[in-house]
Amino acid sequence: MNSLAQLIADFRDEQGCCRRGEMKAFQDLEIEVAIRKAALARDEKGEIYSHQWHLKEKYPDVPKKAERILANCAGKIAACNDFDALHDLIWDELKLRGRVKGVGELYC
């Protein structure tokens, strides 16, 4: 029988939005490269992440717009001390300042 921790780890690996493979794809990148990769919302195969499917259908221009905006914020992003600060910064830059239509909470 698996422990709860093992079940959660298995779920994240196979089903969760934060699969280890996705996380590993970012962990060794320079901040600027990681920002661009995350903004484009595409995996190593060039396919849009499953949790961002609505971008492909409704807002295909969002990733490129977001990439351009967020690349200019690398210093601010690197200075974030926690997830909430990072999320708020991205939200402010894309939704409030950039007015990028189609950006939602999940994208941020």
Image (cartoon, rainbow, N blue to C red):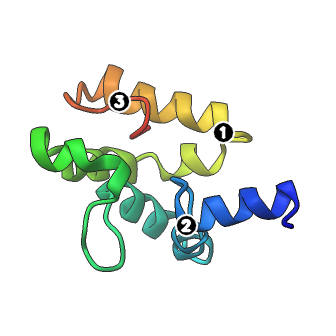
Please name the residue that numbered disc 2 is placed on.
14
3 vs 2, front mark: 2
- Can residue 103 be seen here? The reply is yes
Amino acid carrying mark 3 in the image? Gly
**In the foreground, 31 or 38:** 38
Q: In which quarter of the image is residue 107?
A: top left
Please name the residue that numbered disc 3 is placed on.
104
Cα separation, mark 2 vs mark 1, equals 23 Å
Q: Is mark 1 on a helix, strand or loop?
A: helix
Amino acid carrying mark 1 in the image? Phe
Question: Sequence order check: which comes first, mark 2 or mark 1?
Answer: 2
Cα separation, mark 3 vs mark 2, equals 24 Å
Mark 3 touches mark 2? (CB < 8 Å): no
Q: Residue at x 24, y 24 (%)?
A: 99
Mark 2 Cα-neighbour bin, 10 Å: few <14, some 14–19, many ≥20: few
Q: What element carries label 3?
A: loop
Q: Is residue 56 left or right of residue 30?
A: left
Q: What element carries label 2?
A: helix
Q: Residue at x 55, y 55 (%)?
A: 16
Q: Where is residue 79 in the image (x, y as percent from the top left)?
A: 66, 45
Vertical position of residue 72 compared to residue 32: above or below: above
Amino acid carrying mark 2 in the image? Glu
Vertical position of residue 31 compared to residue 89: above or below: below
